[in-house]
Amino acid sequence: MMYLNTPHLEVHSFQTAKGGNTYCGDSIYMEANNDFFVCILADGLGSGEFAYEASQAAVSIVEANPEKCVDALIDDCNKAMVGKRGAAVAILKVDFQKKQFEYSCVGNIRFYVYPPAGKMIYPMPVTGYLSGRRQRFRTQTYPFDPKSRFLIHSDGFVNVNTRALLTSEHSITILAQQLKEKQIDAFDDMSFIVGNLL
């Protein structure tokens, strides 16, 4: 598990490989400072080494250019897929000063935000996957309330009652452990990121 704890957020991530494979086809990167938090979850098509190679290519874009806007990052991730298997990719960037977040996703990755009092936010992804071919993306921007919680997960995630978990009184650390314990399906690579905006 990876863990970040700053004055602005607390976040955990976790992943497992399909059937005990050496390579996990999912990749995650997270970074936070006083101004923003950015993370990417990339799910390489299929599983094994070539899926890992594709997801790592996307992650390396965000790792090298965390200051870029989400539109530019997902476009660069798409370009990085040339000659690779392709990947579903989700990028979240939270601006702590503006109290808003940007999100863009292509493929079967899910993202939920639970404000402390209010309606769940569930941005819809663009269908398909990043392949290097020209395509349109949809970056969505939302305000966020302090104490909002969020969850991003790949399609290998074993579904649970996310609303009940994320609206509970448990800490993010406990929630992450509970989510991890429920991921017992070894038929796909699996990744999740769960966090709390302070």
Image (spheres, rainbow, N blue to C red):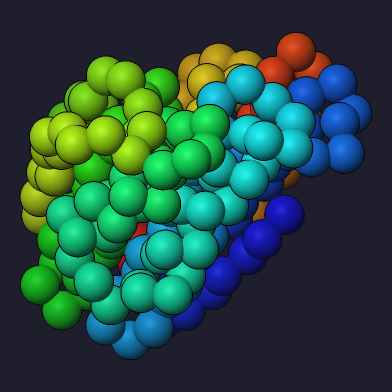
Most extreme residue toward the bottom is 34
Q: Residue 60: give x, y in percent of width and height.
A: 50, 63
Image: 9 above or below 86? below
Occupied quadrant, residue 72: bottom left
Q: Residue 49: give x, y in percent of width and height.
A: 74, 37
* Residue 163 visible (yes or no): no
Q: Nearer the viewer, residue 192 or 41?
A: 41
Pick the quarter of the image with the C terminus.
bottom left
Q: Residue at x 12, y 34 (%)?
A: 136
Q: Nearer the viewer, residue 163 or 183?
A: 183
Residue 31 located left or right of residue 105: right
Residue 9 located left or right of residue 100: right
Image: 111 above or below 39? above
Residue 108 located left or right of residue 141: right
Count all numbered tags in the image, as a single digit: 0
Occupied quadrant, residue 192: top right
